[in-house]
Amino acid sequence: MIIIDLTPDNEKSIHQAAELLIHFFGHLPNGYPTLKEALEEVNESFEPGRISRIALDEKGDLLGWVGAIPAYRGKAWELHPIVIRPNRQKQGIGRALVQDLENLAKDHGVLTLFLGTDDEDDRTSLGGVNLYPDVLAHAAQFKNVREHPFEFYQKCGFVVVGLLPDANGFGKPDIFMAKRVAAKP
């Protein structure tokens, strides 16, 4: 496996990344149900300042894709998106892409990586629940009920830093996670 930049001239990998977006997010209301929408998302990753990295197998086929969007004047990057080919999950590819992104972030003077991992389909104990008025109590006690990816991020060192209730509709929160990547001076 090699990890390289995804570039606008790599049509094969761009299409494969778009297909992964459709596979994982096409069924969600805020997802990418069509190839056109998925390709638009991939092409947005080429905007100035953004990071777009891919893992390829020995044949040059896409294993996974990770991106980052600079925020907070470059002191933090939003990890968005990350997708791994279904038949290659739980083989270290996602971790390798996150580690690669962390290394790039450190090289750019980034202090924190953060992400939002939505629960649009009731895969955590937060889904389908009115989180008000005590949002933080729910945040402190929530659990994974149907293989939500937040546990992957925890294994990569991210911690839950907040919730945005109803971000994607009633009972469909966004779960915010972050990780310090720079050593404290």
Image (spheres, rainbow, N blue to C red):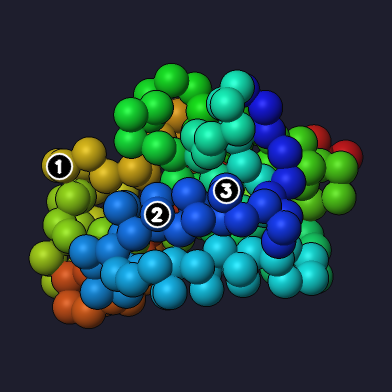
Q: In the image, what residue type sits under mark 1? A: Val
Q: Nearer the viewer, residue 74 or 24?
A: 24
Residue type, mark 2 in image: Glu
Instruction: Give the residue displayed 68% in from the left and 33% down from the top.
Output: 3
Quickly name the residue at label 1.
Answer: 145
Q: Which residue is mark 2?
A: 19
- Other residues around mark 1 within 10 Å, as few (<14) / some (14–19) / many (≥20): few
Could you tell me residue 100's position as x and y percent? 69, 35
Tell me which amino acid carries mark 3: Ser
Give the left or right position of residue 44, taking residue 74 as reference: left
Distance, label 2 to label 3, CA atoms, is 10 Å
Residue 156 seen in the current view = no
Who's the residue at 15% across and 57% down the image? 122
Local secondary structure at mark 1 = loop
Q: Is residue 40 above or below residue 162?
A: below
Q: Earlier in the sequence, mark 1 or mark 2?
A: 2
155 and 131: which is toward the camera: 155
